[in-house]
Image (spheres, grey):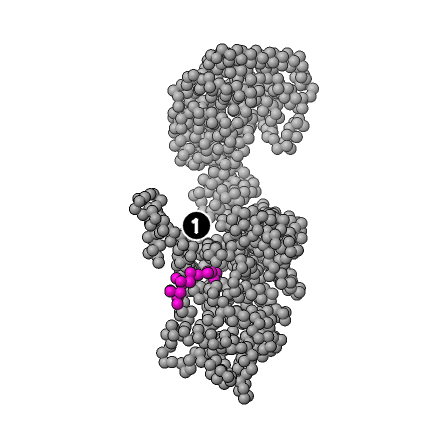
Amino acid sequence: MEPSYFVQARRAGRVVVEEPPKFDLDDYISKYKGRTRFDRLSLIGTSSSYLCLEALKAAIAEAKQGSDVGRYESAVSSLREISPTDPDAILDAAWVGTTKAQVKRNTDTLELELKTYKNNLIKESIRMGYDDLGNHYHRIGDLSKANKAYSQMREFCTTNSHIVIMNMHLINVCIDQRSWFAAQNHIQRIRGATGGQKFPEAEKNSAKLAAAHGLASLASGNYRDAAIDFIGTDPRMSQAKLDDPTDEEAYNEVLTPSDIAIYGGLCALATMERGELQERVLNNTDFRNYLELEPHIRRAITYFVSSKYSPCLQILDSYKADYLLDIYLQPHFQNLYHDIRCKAIRDCLAPFSCITMSALAKIFNSDEEAIMLEIQQMIKREQINARINSVDRVLYTKQKNGRVNVFDTALAAAKEYERTSHLRIMRMQVINAGLEVKGDSGRGQRGGGNINQEWAPPPSSSYESRGTTGSGPQHGGYNGAGDLMDGKSGTRG
Amino acid sequence: MSTMEGGLQQLLAFPPYPMPATPLPDSEYDKQIKAHIQYLNTIPASKLTNGVPNGGGDLLDIVDPSVNTTSYLYILLAYISGSSSKQKLGAVSDSFALGSPLWHKSLEFMDRFDPIQVRYAGNEFRRLVEAVASRARTFSQPFAAVPAIRTAILRVDHSGATFTSTHLIFARLCLEARAYTDALPVLDEIIYYLPCATNKGAENNMFPYLNSKHESSSTYITQESGLSAKLDYRDHLQYFLFGAMLYMGLKEWKKALLFLEIAMTSPVTNNASKIQVEAYKKWVLVSLLYKGSLPSMPKTISSVAAKQYSVVGRPYEGLAAVFMAGIKEEEGVQRLIEEARVGAQFWSHDSNAGLVSQVIEAYRKFSILELEKTYCALTITEIARYTSPDPYDYAETGQYVVHLISSRQLNATISEPTQDPATWIIRFSDSASGPLARSEEQQYEALSKQTRKVKALTDHIKEIDRKLSLSKDLLADAKRRKKEKNEQGGNEGETVWGRDGFDQDEDMMADM
């Protein structure tokens, strides 16, 4: 029985996933660390009708271990809407009280410390002070203050590695804030244009930077850029130990190497042609390290490259629940899937001049009516160049008659030339004869109303639809054809 | 000249009779006709209307309008303005009524006058045309003057390339008379020139004589010639608006659009003219009728004018948006009808209600044309479902499609396996097949026709270019540059911009 919460969510246009995902929730969440754990649990809790209770309870437990009171409260209220009787759905007021007090204490201490450092004018201490303060604000979920604190570090950075640390902090805060443009800016500050890093100190972050950039592109809907970023990610992260918090390669406070494989693979499938997929994705020894973590993506791409669209789409369908429960993929998966399907249909049609709907439906695991509707939409959006014969239920790809086309375009171009030249000539003539429209610029639009009485519109309404029997309108009015904005007629009237 | 006897001989003095074996050289002809007109100007009107004494009869019966055109024109005008009110311009005698002998003589004159001679009497000729037009209008029979004035316009300037005030008079008469087809011979001639103040010194050197053969009518129809009244900016705007409306009456949407665009894009110093705004409103509707969509405004419209068009034309743009969205989304016509109903007062206020109702009718046609993009074959039942007012009336839908195909609005074929329209199948054709496809010969013919048009256009452009190079502004500028050059010469040497100035100067000299 689906909780009424999801019925409403669906009505409100939010994503609701009924199917159970392939992953095990505990396993899944154990791969992440930091704030993203709560974010991910909360998203699963509010969009999976299958895992909601488990995920929300985990989210509440997660929140209680931290010091971000706001997210604890939001998780509890979500749970209350779904299952009001659950013991966890009651707000632990005592915890909230003590945590708030503790947070306040911490904030005060850190601000005070920073003040002392500032008085002492020791750059490094001030930088550390801002660093601590930023970390604190980030932890308690005050992202804009965290961003501010990190930004203020800048003038106290004395080495390149300080700048790198500062920007990495800022990137993470921006990702949490979903300020993708700002995140990309911070990435560019420490990342050279051609993949190399501006500072040697940033080299060890290269994989993280590429992944973060890809994520920002994905989130802003630039799937092709995202694909290029992800497949270009340095393989160093692929072997990161996710359970070891001291492993500096791990970036699992944002995403895991598996995520890189999935995001990169899907974006590539959606935006690259078959040859490109083979060349840049499958034959890419660097990206292979990531793909090996998610063999199903590798299989899907391989199927697509070898024109086996049906199994490729089947794989994506079977992982649909997983993708839709991913915090970054959820808003984009439908678009990506649609693009992949369109591209598959387009590629599939390429060798045919005509193909029956039933054959097409079979290739794409669909029935005739559904595929016809889909094709109609694609033609309307000009994604494929074909026409439907709905009588025989056959799709014809448009054949170009080159010779006729050349004739037609030549004629159209000549006519257009004649037309625009004529218009230009008339403009020149009007200027040359000093016949520009001269109006009184000072009067503004007020005069417009007065002119209407002066200038009777011509009797155009007589054409066809109306009988020509009516006594013609007064034509004397034309002589008084006033200027739209001319105030003179107003003063006369 | 004491008697009219002697006067008559002088009236017939030009052109010389019998015709000399070799035609007069242009210079001699020019000298003689100018002297003749000077003489005509001295004769009081009463003398001209008195007739020939001793029962010699009416001068109009004696003088031949096709030979002694100028004399005949002066006599006609004398009669029209009435003997009593001597030289009072514009006065019209009561005897100049529709159907009167004088009226018939005037119309006959327009058919027979010598087009060369009237170039020397442009003002008088125009007075005659205006008198005829205004008479026809006072008698509420505008059509009575249409054929004669049309002939007159095309005889003065057979190329029809130069705009005159007579064009506007003609277009208005046609519109009032609803004589759409009768307007075409003039409307279809492309206007390339507006009479403008020419650089007399330069032009007179190149075209010293009005009677010579002129390559372009713009060199003898000038502001000084009198063949056109002095123009106001409203004149050409109104002509193109009226012309567009005449084309609309014939459903010549494409030509109407061009005329409307000429009016809309006409340069504006500050604010747009009301006439231009009217043109814009109609342009929106006619675009829908012609293409089924509203293109973006022509780029040459100044930003101020474009904004004003948009503000005043908002209800029209709204209607167009509903029209296009409906076609795209395969919606029924109901929303468009509703939108048209809401704006009803706008359309009727602007006298565009007829066009709007045609737009609503056209919606169905464009809905079917839209299907062509997605389908190559469809049954009538499907077409009815998508586009018909009654989605189950297959017979009516079938008829409508047949009508579209036979009126060449839809390039498709229809197959009728049985009598029942529900079984009919429509096959949309592409440009290379179907009833509207052109054969190779037709393609070639269309291309060579277009080539001829572009060639003619190029000739006009050359002429316009020549005119511009002689315009006062350009010459004044060239003089100024030359002066600067002289002042600068020597002491300053060649600065970078100075060099540019010199180069252009050289070109100017070469042109002259």
Residue nearest the viewer, comparing A83 with B325: B325
Q: Is residue B204 magenta?
A: yes
Instruction: Report the chain holding disc 1.
Output: A
Amino acid at pointer 1: Lys
Can you tell which quarter of the image residue B14 is in?
bottom left
How many numbered marks, from 0 up?
1
Image location (x, y in percent) of residue B78: 55, 76
Figure check: B81 above or below B413: below
Q: Position of residue A59 (x, y in %)?
A: 60, 19
- Secondary structure, magenta segment, majority class: loop
The residue located at (35%, 58%) in the rendering is B512
Q: Which residue is mark 1?
A: A400
State the residue at coordinates (61%, 33%).
Answer: A13
Q: Which residues are magenta?
A: B191-208
Residue A491 x/y as whole percent: 64, 54
| Residue A122 appearing in the image | yes
Is B370 situated above or below B18?
A: above
The extreme bottom residue here reads: B54
Q: Residue at x 54, y 26 (%)?
A: A178
Quadrant of the image containing the C terminus of chain A = bottom right
Q: Nearer the viewer, residue A459 or B75?
A: B75
